[in-house]
Image (cartoon, rainbow, N blue to C red):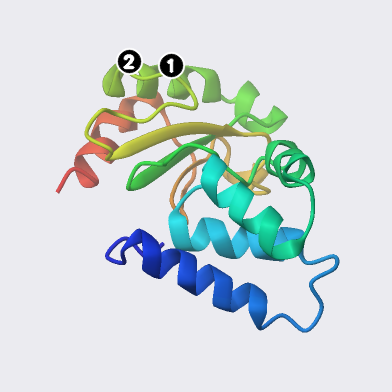
Amino acid sequence: MCVNKSIEEKYNELGNFINNLHEKEGALIQVLHKAQDIFGYLSKEVQVFVAEKLNVPVSKVYGVVTFYSYFTMEPSGKYVINVCMGTACFVRGAAEVLEEFQNKLKIKVGESTSDGKYTLQVLRCVGACGLAPVVTVNDKVYGHFTKDQVGKLIEEYSE
């Protein structure tokens, strides 16, 4: 995510990306990935921009954004904490881990802390069932995670 760029620079970058596509038809998901990478999330304004550049209805863009859980319409914190709630993780205590994160961060799933540092989310399956329960922070995976480790993990990312 390019946080040091101005909004205008970000729109120019996305516009150039779209303009350089060989085939715009069928490129919506690819463009949305790029847009989220540039802006950090897909605001209404970004969705309208994408729709206009690809010559598709805004409703189609919105439909794709809301269908795929990868896309977000809200800004995320610097550290996105995901608690896997797949079957293996759930039966090994993921619900307790999630509850402890909610208590320590004072936010619910899908919310971000007021300082913009943490966002708490759940995943249905990380694909690391042998490590259950699993927590990820951005792209780092923590296996065999317990509720007793929550405070330490938050501390690790507080600097």
Foreground residue among 64 and 140: 64
> Position of 64 compared to 119: left or right?
right
Q: Residue at x 37, y 59 (%)?
A: 7
Where residue 139 sits: x, y (%)?
Answer: 47, 56
Classify 15 as above or below 89.
below
Q: Residue at x 68, y 57 (%)?
A: 52
Q: Kindly identify which residue carries mark 1.
A: 99
Instruction: Give the quarter of the image for residue 69.
Output: top right
**Residue at the extreme left of the image, as rendered:** 159
> Position of 157 compared to 86: left or right?
left
Q: Kindly identify which residue carries mark 2.
A: 103
Q: Tell me the element at label 1.
A: helix
The span from disc 2 to disc 1 (Cα, nearest Å) is: 6 Å
Foreground residue among 23 and 103: 23
Foreground residue among 107 and 90: 107
Instruction: Tell me the kind of residue under disc 2.
Output: Asn
Q: Are marks 2 and 1 in contact (CB under 8 Å)?
A: yes
Q: Residue at x 35, y 46 (%)?
A: 79
Is residue 45 visible to us here? yes
